[in-house]
Image: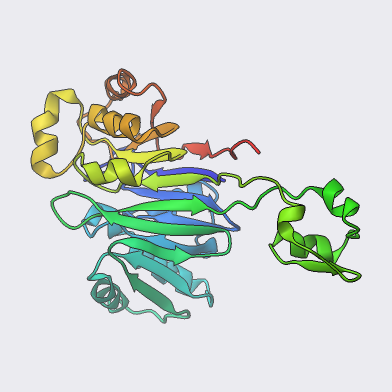
Amino acid sequence: MELIFLGTSSAIPTNHRNHTAIALKGFGEIILLDCGEGTQRQMTRARLSPMKIKKMFITHFHGDHILGVPGMIQSMAFRGRTEPLHIFGPPGLSNLIENIKSLGYFTLSFEIKVHEVLDGTVLEEEDYTVSCCKTEHSVLNLAYSFNEKRSPKFIKEQALECGVKPGPDFGKLQRGISVKVGDTLIKPEQVLGKERKGRKIVYSGDTRPCNQMIDFAQDADILIHESTFNNSHQDNAIETGHSTAAMAAEIAKKACVKKLLLTHISTRYKDTKTLEMEARDIFENSIVADDLMIFEVKQNEP
């Protein structure tokens, strides 16, 4: 599983930082987190195909997080996409997508399935779930949590001892389905190990520090948190509904996450060493993300 940072700037892009967008590559698909202007080109540079995007998750409707959506949709149609595209976001998303459809002249070759969400579990797939919570920004913003489902380890030796032969019955037991060996019912718990923790990735979107982010990010493997300002601009952060690097680090520390990745960097900071140092003073496992940075989210121990 990989996180590819396609854009790490805040409101204005620079020569080195594009508008906000992050690709989550895993579960056999690409999931796009926000889609700022220029995301298509960044995907080309990262050698990612927009046609493999199955879902988008929009945190809020500020332009630096959504203005890449119209071009992305039109390009998908131009390439002949037929697979539905699922877009999740706050209330008002349906109206936004309808307005996007009316921009320019193009034929939409696929269905856009809009999901307006607000709180709690918003998606349940075979391999993962997605939940969201409201944070504190100048407009409604949603943080998202991606939670991997991980089955207990299948213990082949125990299955063989129970008389189960290799083949389809192995697969059934791994999926939690009991099988019969003669007249004996073999239950999954007889051949499966302990529960295993799946990976958890949390993305804050834009927010000032708030208690709900601490609860929401609890024990996450990765917390991607906005870090628009450094300590010298704390007042600006609170006033505009943003966070400093140190504030994000406090969230990570209190939530007991494994790794903090800082993004949404103000253009005033050409050198991000200060941001990273301020975060690491509080939470050592902090990194400032750069455009096109690829971060591998390693599996938890068996």
Q: Is residue 287 visible?
A: yes
User: What is the x, y in percent for residue 58?
Assistant: 32, 59
1 left or right of 159? left
225 left or right of 222? left
Q: Is residue 289 visible?
A: no
* Residue 178 vs residue 156, the one in the foreground: 178
Name the residue at 41% across, 62% down: 56
78 w.r.t. 60: above or below: below
User: What is the x, y in percent for residue 302?
Assistant: 66, 39
120 left or right of 266? right
* Residue 185 vs residue 84, the one in the foreground: 185
* Residue 82 vs residue 60, the one in the foreground: 60
Name the residue at 39% across, 28% down: 287
User: What is the x, y in percent for residue 170?
Assistant: 81, 60
Name the residue at 71% across, 55% down: 189
User: What is the x, y in percent for residue 82?
Assistant: 53, 78
Name the residue at 58% across, 38% down: 300
Q: Quadrant of residue 279?
A: top left
186 w.r.t. 47: above or below: below
